[in-house]
């Protein structure tokens, strides 16, 4: 691990290379003990990073998962949308789990936008209206909160410091959204809940852009924790079946106010197979009993929603696209242990559309129906690999699979996940 961290430099980003749920939280937890600060730059409580320590499970939603390490500071950047009530509960839950000093180690951007209950109601209403064309959101209100931000009517954390303005904005927005979406919204209930926790949240607010600038200038090391994944990025993902913010590497600059030159390395996270939650293109989806077998083996159910994830074979085309666009220097291949017991394992190696090779996932229904996916098949292995101590300890077929994937995505695989525990990672 030390050589990897040395190669990557002072400030490192961890970005999902597929459609989320790749296991970013585990690597963040593994690496964050070597960093002074862990910073979130996009998304909200729709993220779900699960860490298992000595058999005990910790689930992080908006807070950086690196906070499990004592002394590490967690930053919630301006590019996020924050459900303050959920955050207060998450802080309480982590305190109950033994992180007594956690409040003193959290900094929230004054410019982060506040996600309110009415955003969740709008989210569910919009999904209901779409019928069988729904996006498959988490229902956490992320999209409507970012829509308010783009429409310049959003409420920012700094508005908490001016109670009169804060109350006025909530009332105005509730009146507008009640009319737009024919919803029964109660601004006074919303206001009462938030004012109740205001004094708890206010000490956590700060100018996080300036804080990060000064700390980086001092030589402090920062880990940028991505949410969701490159294929869900608002611009570069499978639009419109994407999240509502820039979640790939570019989002670090806009979502934290960090200059591009201060990102010294980028780690991509990819499962040894593929999963996706909700609707949208998924070229390697397996279907049938084999998909259900993979889902059960990998415990593929959302940490935030509990929804079963769609499962498919590793898609080298999609991951290579992520590697190229996000500037990934290395890949952490996770959940290799889940593939133990499969007689054959497939990898998508090429997309053909109308007789021509294409290099990204097509996003229209017509194109997806016509898309041809070429696969390479690899022999599987039966051995339990969860106790391996090095890459050389893996079965030959497992090693060959990793090396083949590495070549197909044109990016070195320098970390391999072989189990759920925080220590179950092999480094190369």
Image (cartoon, rainbow, N blue to C red):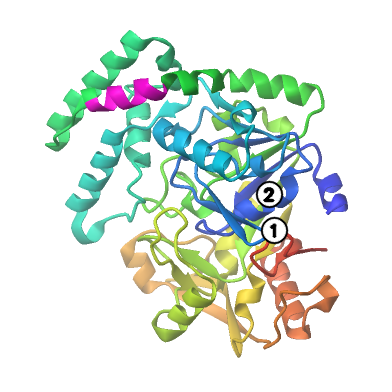
Q: Percent position (x, y) of residue 154?
A: 35, 24
Q: Is residue 373 visible?
A: no
Residue 178 shown left or right of residue 46 in the figure: left
Q: Is residue 194 magenta?
A: yes
Q: Quadrant of the C terminus?
A: bottom right
Q: Is residue 199 above or below residue 114?
A: above
> What segment carries the magenta color?
189-197
The label shown at residue 422 is 1
Q: Please name the residue that numbered disc 2 is placed on.
A: 29
First along the sequence among labels 2 and 1: 2
Tell me the chief SS of the magenta region.
Answer: helix
Q: Residues within 10 Å of mark 2 (few under 14, many from 20)?
A: many
**Picture residue at 48% right of the left edge, 81% below the top:** 293
Q: Percent position (x, y) of residue 191?
A: 29, 22
CB within 8 Å, label 2 to label 1: yes
Q: Is residue 25 visible?
A: yes
Mark 2 lies on a secondary structure that is helix
């Amino acid at each position: 691990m030390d050589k990897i961290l040395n190669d990557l430099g002072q400030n490192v980003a961890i970005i999902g290379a597929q459609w989320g749920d790749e296991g970013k939280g585990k690597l963040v937890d593994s690496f964050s003990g070597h960093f002074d600060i862990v910073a979130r730059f996009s998304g909200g409580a729709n993220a779900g990073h699960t860490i298992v320590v000595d058999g005990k499970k910790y689930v992080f939603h908006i807070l950086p998962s690196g906070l499990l390490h004592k002394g590490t500071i967690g930053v919630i950047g301006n590019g996020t949308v924050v459900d303050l009530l959920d955050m207060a509960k998450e802080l309480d839950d982590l305190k109950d789990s033994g992180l007594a000093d956690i409040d003193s180690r959290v900094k929230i951007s004054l410019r982060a936008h506040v996600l309110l209950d009415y955003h969740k109601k709008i989210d569910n209403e919009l999904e209901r209206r779409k019928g069988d064309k729904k996006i498959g959101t988490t229902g956490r209100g992320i999209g409507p909160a970012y829509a308010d931000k783009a429409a310049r009517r959003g409420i920012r954390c700094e508005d908490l410091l001016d109670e009169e303005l804060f109350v006025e904005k909530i009332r105005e927005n509730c009146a507008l959204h009640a009319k737009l979406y024919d919803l029964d919204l109660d601004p006074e209930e919303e206001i009462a809940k938030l004012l109740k926790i205001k004094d708890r949240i206010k000490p956590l607010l700060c100018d996080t852009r300036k804080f990060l600038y000064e700390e980086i200038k001092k030589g402090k090391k920062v880990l940028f924790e991505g949410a969701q994944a490159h294929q869900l990025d608002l611009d570069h993902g499978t639009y419109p079946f994407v999240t509502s913010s820039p979640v790939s590497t570019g989002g670090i600059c806009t979502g934290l106010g960090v200059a591009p030159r201060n990102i010294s390395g980028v780690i991509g996270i990819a499962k040894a197979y593929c999963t996706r939650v909700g609707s949208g293109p998924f070229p390697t989806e397996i279907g049938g009993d084999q998909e259900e077998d993979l889902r059960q083996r990998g415990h593929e159910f959302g940490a935030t929603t509990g929804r079963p994830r769609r499962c498919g074979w590793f898609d080298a085309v999609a991951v290579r696209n992520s590697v190229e666009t996000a500037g990934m220097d290395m890949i952490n291949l996770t959940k290799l242990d889940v593939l133990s017991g499969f007689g054959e394992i497939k990898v998508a190696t090429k997309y053909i559309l109308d007789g021509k090779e294409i290099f990204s996932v097509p996003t229209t229904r017509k194109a997806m129906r016509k898309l041809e996916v070429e696969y390479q098949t690899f022999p599987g292995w039966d051995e339990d690999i969860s106790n391996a101590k090095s890459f050389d300890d893996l079965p030959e077929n497992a090693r060959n699979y990793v090396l083949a994937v590495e070549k197909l995505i044109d990016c070195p695989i320098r970390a391999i996940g072989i189990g759920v525990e925080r220590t179950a990672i092999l480094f190369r």
